[in-house]
Image (cartoon, rainbow, N blue to C red):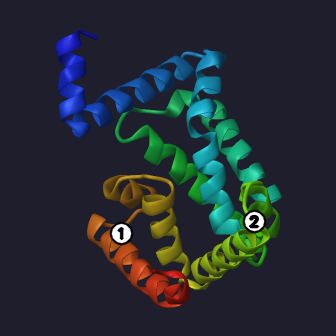
């Protein structure tokens, strides 16, 4: 890539997204050709996000990890069917969503976050700060769990996983306007529930 192209990407965030998507597509093409290294690179890029999304939807770390693994198993097994007709990120999240929905039909969705909260709390916090953080985090998780499923999913995809509105719409199979409405309503509901913790 020439320096002028790099400067253009810095000035235009959309250009950076385009370059990133081209990079993802190049990995999918290599994967379709049977290059195992491409699968590892895809996992390096998307594992954390898919795991976080699955955990948010299922509430169980062990099941979330299973879903993340199954996404890449499915991508590998069906690699010859992939066509570049949409965002690679949306393609992966759509697979994850289908796996989550399948699991949700067979098990009740439960939220268990205590171990996650303990793991994420920095050790330098005072006991008082740690208790306050844990209380706030638990309140957030309860508020998220109380959202209607599709509203929680849209919020998670856009605000927590960083998908664009269009990509989230592609994942959930709805219009961009519907995603916008879900995210807006989720934010409003979370603001009400978390009012005691807001400045």
Q: Identify the residue at horizontal 43%, vertical 21% (top origin).
A: 26
| Residue 174 on image: x %, y % | 36, 67
Mark 1 Cα-neighbour bin, 10 Å: few <14, some 14–19, many ≥20: many
Residue 136 falls in image quadrant: bottom right
For the N terminus, give its image quadrant: top left
Disc sitting over residue 42 in the figure: none
For the residue pair 190 and 130, the one nearer the viewer reads as: 130
Circle 1 is placed at which residue position?
A: 179
Which tag is nearer the camera, tag 1 or tag 2?
2
Relative side of 97 to 100, left or right: left
Task: Tell me if I can see residue 172 in this picture.
Answer: no
Residue 154 falls in image quadrant: bottom left
Q: Is residue 82 above or below residue 53?
A: above
Circle 2 is placed at which residue position?
A: 126
For the residue pair 183 and 74, the one nearer the viewer reads as: 183
For the residue pair 142 and 42, the one nearer the viewer reads as: 142
* Tally of numbered tags: 2
The mark that comes first in sequence, 1 or 2, is 2
Determine contact: label 1, label 2, CB under 8 Å.
Answer: no
| Residue 113 on image: x %, y % | 76, 69
């Amino acid at each position: 890539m020439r320096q002028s192209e790099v400067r253009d990407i810095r000035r235009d965030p959309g250009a950076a997204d385009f370059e990133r998507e081209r990079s993802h597509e190049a990995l999918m093409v290599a994967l379709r050709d049977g290059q195992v290294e491409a699968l590892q690179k895809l996992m390096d890029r998307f594992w954390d996000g898919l795991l976080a999304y699955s955990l948010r939807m299922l509430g169980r770390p062990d099941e979330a990890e299973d879903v993340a693994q199954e996404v890449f198993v499915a991508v590998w097994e069906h690699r010859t069917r992939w066509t570049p007709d949409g965002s690679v990120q949306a393609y992966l999240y759509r697979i994850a969503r289908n796996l989550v929905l399948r699991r949700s039909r067979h098990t009740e969705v439960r939220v268990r976050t205590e171990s996650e909260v303990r793991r994420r709390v920095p050790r330098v916090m005072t006991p008082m700060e740690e208790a306050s953080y844990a209380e706030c985090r638990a309140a957030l998780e309860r508020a998220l769990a109380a959202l209607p499923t599709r509203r929680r999913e849209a919020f998670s995809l856009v605000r927590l996983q960083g998908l664009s509105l269009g990509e989230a719409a592609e994942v959930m199979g709805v219009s961009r306007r519907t995603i916008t409405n879900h995210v807006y309503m989720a934010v409003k509901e979370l603001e009400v529930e978390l009012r005691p913790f807001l400045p």
